Structure formats: structure tokens, C-alpha cells
Image (cartoon, grey):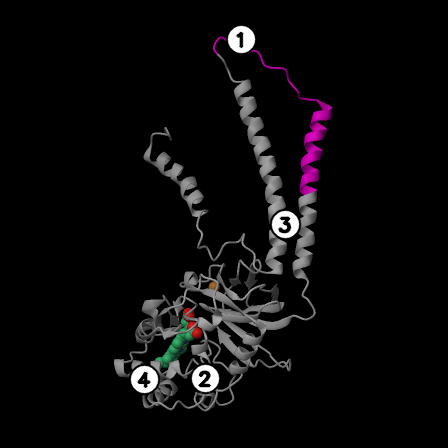
Amino acid sequence: MNLRNSGRGKALLLVPLVLALGACATDAPLDTLDPKGPEADAIQNLVVPVFAIAAVVFVLVEFGVLFLAIKFRQRKGDDDSLPVQHHGNFKLEIGWTILPALVLAGVGAASVFTLFDLADTPADAQDVTVIGQQWWWEYRYDVDGDGEDDIITANDLVIPVGQPIALTIESRDVIHSFWIPALNGKRDAVPGRAQPLTIEADEPGVYRGQCSEFCGLSHAYMRMRVVALEPADYQTWQENQLTDAQVPEEELAKQGLEQFRTSCSACHLVSGPGGNADLYKGAAQVSGAAPNLTHLASRGVFAGSIFDLWLDTNFNEEVDTEEIGKIFNVADMKKWLRNAPAEKPMYPQGERGMPNLQLDDAQIDALIAYLKTLE
Ligand SMILES: [Cu+2]
């Protein structure tokens, strides 16, 4: 087949073009070459020199191949004799064996040192347990260090800037992979294992990620965010997370609470008098299979971070975190409560994920009024 003139050949030529254009994106929150914390810096400091060495080798080799191919090409009227042969040139052969070995040994040593460096967890790190689940991330904080989780939240992993965070990554079902490119490399969430990963953010902001191990139907809709706050803001956040939900005052929201206790308690937990924890009768603090909603409205996103919970915020900008949360995203929340599997593919019969609960408009409006109070 003549590649150059065939349609497929032209299509193949488009591939590098598309890749090159893709590399020009400025709004690229998953950029692996834009570190925002010390762990990501360590990786960058390895990647840049290794890439530079690889680039030099690439150019030299390609240039050499082209040069030799052109210089020794078959010309018209050649007598078909071979050029001078170098086989058995001891010096040359030793040289081009040892030089690559040395280059690789150098790169290898640098890589191993970086790996050791990344495996070190600073002594003052704060612990957070990360649990991957089809198809969202749960975060658990043991604030007072008594071995019990005091804060259980989802989607947004909230951390203070300048503070190393020692994550312990687990899974409740299949293998997922936790990855916030701006803060560190990826680490798999493997059922039955607890895998460490340290992250730290230099500046306040929202750092996005994406589950990077195929984990079933809605893998592509399993995103996550790290929200880094100034220490004082973090303190405020933490104090708020430690409070219980109160019985709402507004009439519609009160109806929503009743509806919530009826329709949602099989899976979701809201602790406090304004919630349904009493229905769990001593069971674990969460049902184990759905996000804890006690402080739902304090998050920026929902459903595996695919929908904004609050509108009118541009999370790609340097975020003034105090500005997060102006208008509750009623439209997407309505659709979610009406028929969640239509918004995000989930296995049928609520085997995994949230089923269609056949709610009517009035029930949904009441539920939204209630959910909004869960700040
Ligand atoms: Cu996943």
C-alpha cells in the first residue's frame, strides 16, 4: 500500500499534528509538568534533566542515522562495492557500549534517589485516609489522633497549604488510582491494602485529578480535587466539619429532612439531630457505599466531582477560596435526584451507585431545600 497517497496514510499524518496542538493547551489542570508542591517538584527535577538527556541522545542518533543514510546511499553508476567496514573496531565498540551504560546508570541512580525521597513521609505530616469507590473518592480525617475518624467527606480533599499530608489510600471495591498531577505522582487504591502517598500544596487553590485505573462503567466520571486553604481558613473548615447537622428551620427543608430519612437513609448518612444517624442503630458511621452528606453544601462539586455544586465560580483561575459557593446548582442536583443513573452511568438496580428513586417534583424540591442547609 502506498501510505502517502492513501486516506489512512493522511489520517496517520494527522496524529502527530493533533498531539502537537494538544500540547499547546493553556487551560490544562491535569498538566504533569506544572508542579505545585514539593513532591511534584521532586518529580519535575528528575523529569527535566532525564528528558534533556533523552533529547540529546535522540537528536544525535537520528542525526547520525540520517547522515549515514544519505552519505552512503546508492548512487547512479555505483559499482556496488561496500564502504570501509568498522566491524571489529575495538575502541568504537567499547565506547558505544560503555557510554549508554553510563548514561543509563546515571539516570537510574537519580530515579532511585527521587523514589526514596518521595517515599519519605515528613514527621509533622497530617494523616488522611483516602478510599476509592465506584465512582467517587471518600476522605477521612482523624483529627484528634484517637484512631477514630472525625471527619468523613467526599470529592474535595481539603488540606492546609504548606503542610505535608500523609495519605493512606484504600479501596472498597476494585482497583482505582489516586492522582493529582500538580501535587504528586499516582498511587493505586487496591482492595485490602493501605498504600501511602504524601502530598503538599505550596499555594491555596484547587488541584484537580482523575481516577487513573480503569474501574468500571463510570471510571471516566471519577474525578477528584484537592482544595488547599490557608491554615486559618483550613481551621475554620475543620471546625465546621466537626459540627453536627441541625434540624432546619425553613418548612420546605424540614419536609426535605423527613423525605431524606425515608428515601435516602439506606445509603447516605448525615450526623446530628438534623440528620439520620439515629436510624443506623450503632452501625458504622457510614453505610459504606455512599458519600457522607453531613456537610455536603460545604463542598464545591458532587457525584465524583463531575458537577459543580455551586455555580459562578471559575475553578481554573487562581481561586479565592472565600468566593467559592454563590449559587446552588439546583438544575444539576434536580436531575441527579430525579434519575442519577441518567447523569452518570451506574450498574442497574443500585448494585453500585445511586438508583433512580422515582421521586416526584415536590419531593425533589423539598430534598434540595434540605441539602442546601447541610453546610
Ligand atoms: Cu476509579
Mark 3 or 2 closer to N-term? 3
Mark 3 or 1 closer to N-term? 3
Q: What range of the chain is rendered magenta?
A: 76-105
Asked if the beta carbon under badge 3 is closer than 8 A to the nearest atom of ligand 1, the reply is no
The residue that mark 2 highlights is 270
Tell me the amino acid under the disc marked 2. Answer: Val
**Image marks 3 and 2: residues in contact by CB distance under 8 Å:** no
Helix, strand or loop under label 4: helix
Q: CA distance from mark 3 to mark 1?
A: 51 Å
Q: CA distance from mark 4 to mark 2?
A: 16 Å
Helix, strand or loop under label 2: loop
How crowded pointer 2 is (Cα within 10 Å; few <14, some 14-19, many 20+) is rated as many
Tell me the amino acid under the disc marked 1. Answer: Asp
**Image marks 4 and 2: residues in contact by CB distance under 8 Å:** no
Q: Is residue 104 magenta?
A: yes
**Image marks 1 and 2: residues in contact by CB distance under 8 Å:** no
The residue that mark 4 highlights is 366
The residue that mark 3 highlights is 46
Mark 3 or 4 closer to N-term? 3
Tell me the amino acid under the disc marked 4. Answer: Ala
How crowded pointer 1 is (Cα within 10 Å; few <14, some 14-19, many 20+) is rated as few
Residue 226 as seen in the image, left or right of residue 14: right
Helix, strand or loop under label 3: helix
Question: Which residue sits furthest left?
Answer: 361
Mark 1 or 2 closer to N-term? 1
User: Residue 88, relative to residue 200: is it above or below?
Assistant: above
Front of the two marks 4 and 2: 4
The residue that mark 1 highlights is 79
Count of numbered badges drawn on the protein = 4
Image point (37%, 34%), residue name: 9
